Amino acid sequence: MDDLQFGTRNKRGDWAPKAHPQIAFFWSNPFDLTKWVKFLIGYVWPWNVFHMAVTLLYWRYLLPDWETMKTLSWSWALWLYAVNGIGIFLMYGAIEFFYYWKRRQGTRFKYNAKFPAEQPSDVFWFKSQNIDNFIKSYVYGIAMWTLVEVFMLWCFANHYVYWLNWSEHPYWLTFLMFMTPVIHEVNFFVIHRTIHIPILYKWIHSLHHNSVNPSPWSSLSMHPVETFVYHGVVWWHLILPSNPLIALFQLHMAGYGAINGHIGFDKLEITEDTALDSHAYLHYLHHKYFEVNYGGDGLIPLDKWLGTWHDGSKEGQAMMDARYAKKVARANAQKQNS
Ligand SMILES: [Zn+2]
Ligand SMILES: [Zn+2]
């Protein structure tokens, strides 16, 4: 595919999309039926259909039975760790293999022309972003994800929380299912913005930001505290009356879905003329500039409302620069006063 039909490339070879990401259309135009249809298709297809398919696979074949999960034990916890680990290896590994190792589409649609393998750095274990991020994904990311999952399933197994049935509460559960991306986005914004408070950033979140040019294995390479609160989005289903299937779906949207912001390519070419949209640009800009785009795709556009939205346009850049200049002026004023 010719990526220059969709974007521009600068002197360094970095590619940027011509069409800037937009917040969800209904905030400005809620009654446009055609846009609703288009939006709803994109809302479920393909990523959420994928997460639901994986969730059903877990539900049907991979989860231990509910009687077993009534008692906490290492055996089923380690089983789930292995299941999550293998699942992530297959999904993230496939994207890493084809697009970063085999480089099947070269740098077409790639935001940063460099591949992490070409940029050894002291901030990483073994000076390698790939090895460092891979190990931390397993030792921190997936371990904490599994811990959250085990606790959630144990609560449901013992009926310590509401477990609503689909036959008795179809409307509420369907509504809740549709709200999972909203819950994800708001929850992510709040915890992510919080760990950007300087002291928490230094202690917790800087580990994830070591990857300025993120790639698939950066997705779950987080400090244990961060990955615990990130996957803790599932607590909403222990507070609200819910169902473990929806809770598991919510958890997968966080675990398997973390890759979306870190793919590094705007589109993944599947065939000669079909490609998969990654939805990675806003979070790519977050890794590049740090203090913009704390949230997701603008479904609930908290960044827009709070002035931290950067869509890659000149206006977005000017707003960020102005905020930064104000911050520097404030810091200088404080220095003079002390
Ligand atoms: Zn990230
Ligand atoms: Zn961040």
Image (cartoon, rainbow, N blue to C red):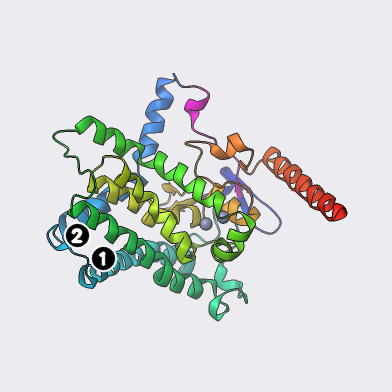
How far from the left and from the top, in percent, is residue 56?
21, 51
Say what amino acid the circle numbered 1 marks.
Leu
Q: Is residue 319 above or below residue 249?
A: above
Quadrant position of the C terminus in the picture = bottom right
Q: Is residue 311 shown to the viewer in this render?
A: yes
Pointer 1 residue Cβ closer than 8 Å to ligand 1: no
Which mark is drawn over residue 255?
none
Query: Do callouts 2 and 1 mark residues in contact (Cβ within 8 Å)?
Result: yes
Tell me which residue sits at (45%, 66%) in the image: 224
Residue 42, quarter of picture:
top left
Q: Is residue 171 above or below residue 140?
A: above
Residue 20, quarter of picture:
top right
Q: Secondary structure at mark 2?
A: loop
Assess whether residue 25 is covered by the magenta stretch: yes
Label 2: few (<14), some (14–19) or many (≥20) C-alpha neighbours in 10 Å: some
What segment is highlighted magenta in the picture?
Answer: 16-29
- In space, the residues marked 2 and 1 are separated at their CA atoms by 8 Å
How far from the left and from the top, in percent, is residue 201?
59, 60
Tell me which residue sits at (25%, 50%) in the image: 53
Tell me which residue sits at (46%, 49%) in the image: 278
Label 1: few (<14), some (14–19) or many (≥20) C-alpha neighbours in 10 Å: many
1 or 52, which is in the foreground? 52
The residue pinned by badge 1 equals: 80
Which mark is drawn over residue 63?
2
Majority secondary structure of the magenta segment? loop
